[in-house]
């Protein structure tokens, strides 16, 4: 996809404050000196059996990009792929109800949508938010000396794969669902109170893939401490047993040339750092002086936030994992 996007002509509209050139989480378009639109779209196939829960996860994931940009979601359009025959329409109703419930929690109005007949179910939203043009968070402004804060635990992709194989425990699945349905709103609003230089949410490219995008866009390198990254229950064990999603393997192919691992980092941990996340947390590059009060604020909100690394001047490898 990157190679295709690079071939598109450059846009010259001065109101496009964030486009697709930095692989950021959402686009931002200025309406005035006081307001800009944040726009994003995301949809995917079911990763849990319960349709209502799937709708909630899809909605939470779709909203996340707006929060990662420092924005407030205001409206959404649903995107539905569902077969016209062979499936119970009640399943679709439950998916839509689950998504609607999460959108209502976010204060985001669902004002329409589009559906097509497709044998493979897919669901998500195009979401529009608002942000002040001078308060946009992007992935392109991390500075040497910043510290990296991660607001959720890792491992949803591997747990989902274990679930599909009938090997995931109820505890690990419940923890994964709780994480995937937790809005990043609280983390985004808390970040707005501090000096944050860059942000992104951790989704399909995994922690290392999205860290790579931040490093490349900002012209810096990152050092990650794998011992400080928290994982969901039993995710390490499932990784050790080989429950690796296809997206994880593609992430390794895409990112591994930019990453250097210390010999002490076990293979099962390396896999988890590549693991594609659904509705993962925010990765924040915060000024060093802000780290302790920011962590205290995030943890007071009940978030499992951890300092997991630092930003350094550009070097090789682009990302070092210790």
Image (cartoon, helix red, strand yellow):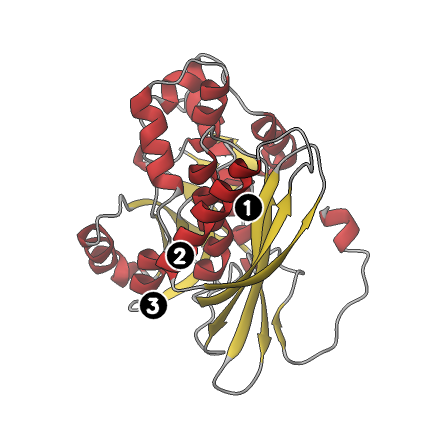
Q: x%, y% of residue 212?
A: 55, 46
- Residue 285: image tag: 2
Q: In this view, does 133 lie above or below 199?
A: below
Q: Name the residue under label 1.
A: 212
- The answer to whether residue 279 of the structure is visible from this angle is no
Residue drawn at point x = 20 percent, y = 59 percent: 293
Q: In this view, does 294 lie to the left or right of 273?
A: left
Specify which label sits upstream in the sequence, 3 or 1. Answer: 3
Q: In which quarter of the image is the C terminus?
A: top left
Q: Mark 3 points at which residue?
A: 192
Specify which label sits upstream in the sequence, 2 or 1. Answer: 1
- Badge 1: how crowded within 10 Å, few (<14), some, or many (20+)? many
Instruction: Indicate the quadrant where residue 113 lies.
Output: bottom right
Q: What element carries label 2?
A: strand
Q: x%, y% of residue 43?
A: 59, 46
Q: x%, y% of residue 314?
A: 53, 52
Q: Is mark 3 on a helix, strand or loop?
A: loop
- The answer to whether residue 19 of the structure is visible from this angle is yes
Q: In this view, does 52 lie above or below 10?
A: above
């Amino acid at each position: 996809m990157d190679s295709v996007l690079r071939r598109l002509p450059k846009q010259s509209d001065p109101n496009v404050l964030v486009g697709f050139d930095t692989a950021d989480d959402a686009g931002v378009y200025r309406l005035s000196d006081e307001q800009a639109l944040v726009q994003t779209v995301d949809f995917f196939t079911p990763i849990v059996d319960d349709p209502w829960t799937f709708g909630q996860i899809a909605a939470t994931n779709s909203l996340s990009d707006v929060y990662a940009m420092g924005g407030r979601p205001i409206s959404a359009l649903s995107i539905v792929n569902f077969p016209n025959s062979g499936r119970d329409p009640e399943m679709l109703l439950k998916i839509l109800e689950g998504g609607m419930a999460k959108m209502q929690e976010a204060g985001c109005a669902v004002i329409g949508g589009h559906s097509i007949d497709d044998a493979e179910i897919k669901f998500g939203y195009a979401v529009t938010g608002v942000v002040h043009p001078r308060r946009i968070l992007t992935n392109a402004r991390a500075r040497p000396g910043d510290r990296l804060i991660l607001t959720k635990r890792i491992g949803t992709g591997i747990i989902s794969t274990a679930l599909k194989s009938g090997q995931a425990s109820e505890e690990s699945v419940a923890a994964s669902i709780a994480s995937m349905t937790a809005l990043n709103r609280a983390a985004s609003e808390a970040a707005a109170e501090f000096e944050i230089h860059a942000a992104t949410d951790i989704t399909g490219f995994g922690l290392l893939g999205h860290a790579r995008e931040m490093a490349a866009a900002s012209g810096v390198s990152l050092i990650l401490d794998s011992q400080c990254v928290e994982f969901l229950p039993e995710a390490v064990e499932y990784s050790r047993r080989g429950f690796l999603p296809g997206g994880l393997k593609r992430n390794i192919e895409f990112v591994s040339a930019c990453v250097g691992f210390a010999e002490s980092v076990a293979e099962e941990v390396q896999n988890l750092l590549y693991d594609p996340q659904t509705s993962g947390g925010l990765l924040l590059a915060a000024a060093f002086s802000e780290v302790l009060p920011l962590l205290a604020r995030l943890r007071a909100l009940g978030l499992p936030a951890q300092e997991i690394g630092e930003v350094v001047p550009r070097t090789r490898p682009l990302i070092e994992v210790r």
